[in-house]
Image (tube, rainbow, N blue to C red):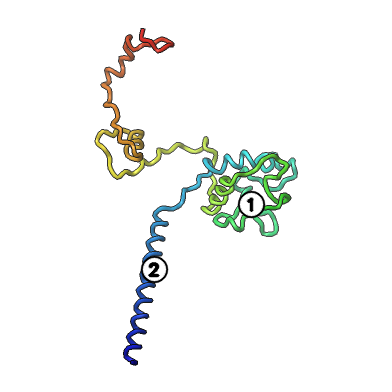
């Protein structure tokens, strides 16, 4: 009897051990996929600057000193400045410590920003973008007109048909479900010749 109980106990222990190993493997795979596929990268000029310009800078922009408002949101230094009492509008990487997040998510009308009487309000998407931007490090960018243009990397494709030429066709053919074959390229002499006289149409679409 004691041998049978010992066998059952060992069997239960092995079962629990196998379950733990499988759970650890599953968590590892999930973590690996999350690391390989991070959330969308928030870009300040594209995602955040329009929100601040439209909803915040009327009070927290260049005219803030004339309105006796201490917080400036039109510069990186202003966004990261000490507001006193250990408070900062933005604490990079820590939205839960950022005064900006606390105010835009406040349920009290007297605390929420933008003020209720300003006629401006943030949508849920805009609030999420601001929170995620801070979480990702609150990276600031100069105005786009001061940033040298950079050619974006072409998307990686599982297959690349031989008839794909140029970035636009590659985006279209490789990264969409379309399997439409593009028109073959025209000869240079045809492109330089211009439209034929028979191709001219009047305003009603009739050939001339």
Q: Is residue 94 left or right of residue 148?
A: right
| x, y percent for residue 119 | 69, 39
| Quadrant in the rendering for residue 163 | top left
Q: Secondary structure at mark 1?
A: loop
- Report the Cα–Cα distance between label 1 and label 2: 36 Å
Along the line of sight, which residue is nearer the eye, 195 or 73?
Answer: 195
Residue at image location 27% in from the left, 20% down from the top: 188
Residue at image location 38% in from the left, 41% down from the top: 153
Along the line of sight, which residue is nearer the eye, 144 or 11?
Answer: 11
Q: Secondary structure at mark 2?
A: helix
Q: Is residue 171 left or right of residue 111?
A: left
Quadrant showing the C terminus: top left
Q: Is residue 197 above or below residue 91?
A: above
| x, y percent for residue 172 | 35, 35
The furthest residue to the top: 208
| Quadrant in the rendering for residue 193 | top left
Give the numbered dot on residue 24: 2
Residue at image location 44% in from the left, 53% down from the top: 38
Give the numbered dot on residue 105: 1
Q: Is residue 115 left or right of residue 144?
A: right
Quadrant showing the N terminus: bottom left
| Quadrant in the rendering for residue 51 | top right
**Marks 1 and 2, the one that precedes in the sequence:** 2
Crowd tier of the residue under label 1, counting other residues whose Cα lies within 10 Å: few below 14, some 14–19, many 20 or above:
some
Along the line of sight, which residue is nearer the eye, 178 or 8?
Answer: 8
Q: Is residue 36 above or below residue 199?
A: below
């Amino acid at each position: 009897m004691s041998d049978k109980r010992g066998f059952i106990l060992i069997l239960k222990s092995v079962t629990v051990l196998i379950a733990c190993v499988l759970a650890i493997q599953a968590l590892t795979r999930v973590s690996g996929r999350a690391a390989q596929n991070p959330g969308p990268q928030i870009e300040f000029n594209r995602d955040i600057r329009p929100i601040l310009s439209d909803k915040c800078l009327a009070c927290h922009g260049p005219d803030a000193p004339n309105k006796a408002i201490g917080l400036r949101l039109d510069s990186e230094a202003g966004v990261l400045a000490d507001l006193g009492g250990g408070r900062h509008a933005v604490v990079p990487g820590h939205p839960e410590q950022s005064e900006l997040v606390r105010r835009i998510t406040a349920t009290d009308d007297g605390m929420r920003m933008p003020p209720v009487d300003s006629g401006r309000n943030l949508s849920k998407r805009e609030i999420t973008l601001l929170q995620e931007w801070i979480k990702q490090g609150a990276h600031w960018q100069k105005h786009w007109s001061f940033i040298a243009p950079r050619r974006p990397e072409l998307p990686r494709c599982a297959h690349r048909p031989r008839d794909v030429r140029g970035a636009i066709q590659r985006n279209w053919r490789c990264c969409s479900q379309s399997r439409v074959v593009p028109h073959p390229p025209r000869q240079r002499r045809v492109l330089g010749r211009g439209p034929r006289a028979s191709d001219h149409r009047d305003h009603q679409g009739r050939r001339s």
